[in-house]
Image: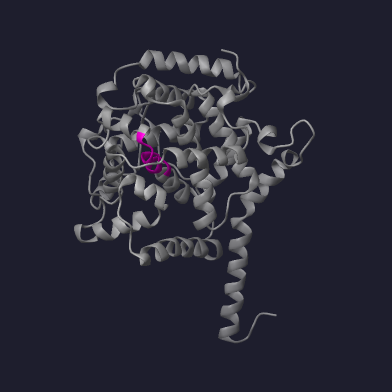
């Protein structure tokens, strides 16, 4: 019976609302596990979930967390993954030498976001996704042997583990075993397509975790290039804050770093209060979402749209740090009123072609080579039937 007093009615309605939130919040995950239940049963030939999971299925599995359940946290965890890579001197020296950091830190961040979004949202066997992956390979090839295979594996591991760890610590739910395995399989496939020999790729999440921890112990040490890259990127993160809040922002960022990473970047130790309260604030956010926020009704995206009359060129409706490739529309200009860097014609408002993403000086270079490499990549993958990470055919 419905309570007949105001306190009872409020309690009843609150309980009903919370129950509805929990039911709807876990529905997509429940549906996902029901669809892929057959993969959760081990067998003698493939005892590990990572062995039973195809990268094409992994791609579908990742969409639930990345576009529906927790896009905000995953987006920021990937930013942190790129940031964390600057704790390795062999990574930071390449970027300093290329002059992309500190001079082009904002452009690099937006181009990286575009490339990753094309691969994640479109799929690496699509024309756009495979072209984005091959464009990334082209940009890396400009550095020759300066980019070590071990560093590629390490950065790949950050894209796997930082989202897993951040959601476990701070989000309204952790990633399930299926979702964690999907991240491993999908990024391992990308690693193989970036030229990492399959026999060098760890074969399970457990193996990769051990490899990553060992690599950090051996290679995450201070270097001036680390500090230059990390400081420029931290300043980019904090650009929206007013000057009086910059010190607070610096301490907040440092509070989320491990001591090893913080020391490798040359950052000062933050006050203890920041170490206590920054994680708590993020955890409180996750708790509130879990119990009181209804799930998204629309998938997350940057609002990419193909330019009319110019097939293959895309504009965005949103941005991370700087409004590169954002269409000159009312919404973008309104956001620009509160953005430290408002939209303007200097940010290529006409949009981008996937095969041309990257530094301005390379914008017109490698276009045909990238398109050709992407076509060959799709043909070799054969619609997902021939994964690169388990296929050594040249």
Give the farthest residue toward the front: 218
Number of numbered markers = 0
102 sits to left or right of 2: left
Residue 132 visible, this orientation: yes
Q: Residue 328: say if magenta.
A: no
Image coords of residue 256 (percent x, y)? 40, 55
Q: Main secondary structure of the magenta part?
A: helix
300 sits to left or right of 335: right
Rendered residue at 33%/28% (across/down): 352
Closest to the observer, 191 or 85: 85
Closest to the observer, 159 or 270: 270
Image coords of residue 216 (percent x, y)? 46, 41
Rendered residue at 37%/32% (across/down): 90
Q: Residue 86: say if magenta.
A: yes
Image coords of residue 251 (percent x, y)? 31, 58
Work out which quarter of the rendered image holds the C terminus and state it.
Answer: top right
Rendered residue at 51%/56% (across/down): 169
Which of the 4 image quarters holds residue 341?
top left
Which of the 4 image quarters holds residue 205?
top right
Q: Which residues are magenta?
A: 81-89
- Compared with 18, 25 (above or below) is above
Image coords of residue 75 (percent x, y)? 44, 45
9 sits to left or right of 268: right
């Amino acid at each position: 019976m419905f309570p007949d007093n105001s306190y009872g009615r409020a309690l009843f309605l609150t309980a009903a609302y919370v129950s509805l939130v929990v039911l709807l919040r876990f529905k997509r995950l429940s549906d996902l596990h029901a669809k892929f239940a057959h993969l959760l049963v081990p067998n003698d030939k493939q005892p590990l979930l990572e062995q039973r999971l195809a990268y094409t299925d992994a791609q579908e599995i990742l969409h639930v967390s990345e576009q529906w359940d927790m896009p905000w946290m995953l987006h920021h965890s990937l930013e942190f993954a790129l940031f964390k890579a600057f704790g390795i001197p062999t990574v930071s020296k390449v970027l300093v030498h290329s002059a992309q950091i500190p001079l082009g830190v904002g452009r690099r961040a937006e181009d990286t976001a575009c490339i990753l979004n094309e691969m994640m949202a479109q799929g690496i066997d699509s024309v756009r996704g495979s072209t984005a992956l091959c464009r990334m390979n082209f940009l890396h090839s400009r550095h020759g042997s300066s980019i070590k295979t071990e560093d590629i594996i390490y950065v790949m591991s950050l894209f796997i583990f930082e989202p897993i760890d951040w959601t476990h610590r701070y989000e309204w739910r952790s990633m399930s075993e299926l979702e964690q395995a999907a991240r491993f399989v999908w990024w391992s496939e990308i690693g193989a397509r970036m030229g990492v020999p399959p026999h060098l790729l760890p074969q399970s999440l457990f193996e990769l975790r051990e490899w990553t921890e060992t690599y950090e112990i051996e290679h995450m040490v201070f270097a001036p290039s680390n500090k230059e890259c990390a400081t420029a990127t931290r300043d980019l993160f904090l650009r929206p804050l007013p000057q009086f809040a910059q010190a607070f922002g610096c301490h907040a960022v440092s509070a989320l770093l491990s001591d090893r990473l913080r020391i490798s970047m040359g950052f000062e130790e933050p006050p203890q209060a920041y170490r206590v309260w920054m994680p708590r604030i993020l955890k409180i956010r996750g708790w509130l979402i879990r119990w009181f926020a209804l799930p998204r009704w629309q998938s997350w995206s940057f609002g990419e749209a193909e330019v009319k009359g110019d097939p293959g060129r895309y504009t965005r409706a949103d941005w991370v740090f700087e409004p590169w490739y954002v269409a000159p529309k009312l919404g973008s200009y309104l956001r620009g009123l509160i953005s430290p860097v408002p939209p303007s014609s200097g940010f290529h408002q006409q949009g981008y072609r996937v095969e041309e993403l990257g530094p301005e000086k390379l914008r017109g270079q490698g276009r045909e080579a990238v398109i050709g490499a992407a076509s060959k990549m799709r043909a070799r993958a054969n619609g997902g039937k021939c994964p690169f990470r388990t296929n050594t055919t040249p």
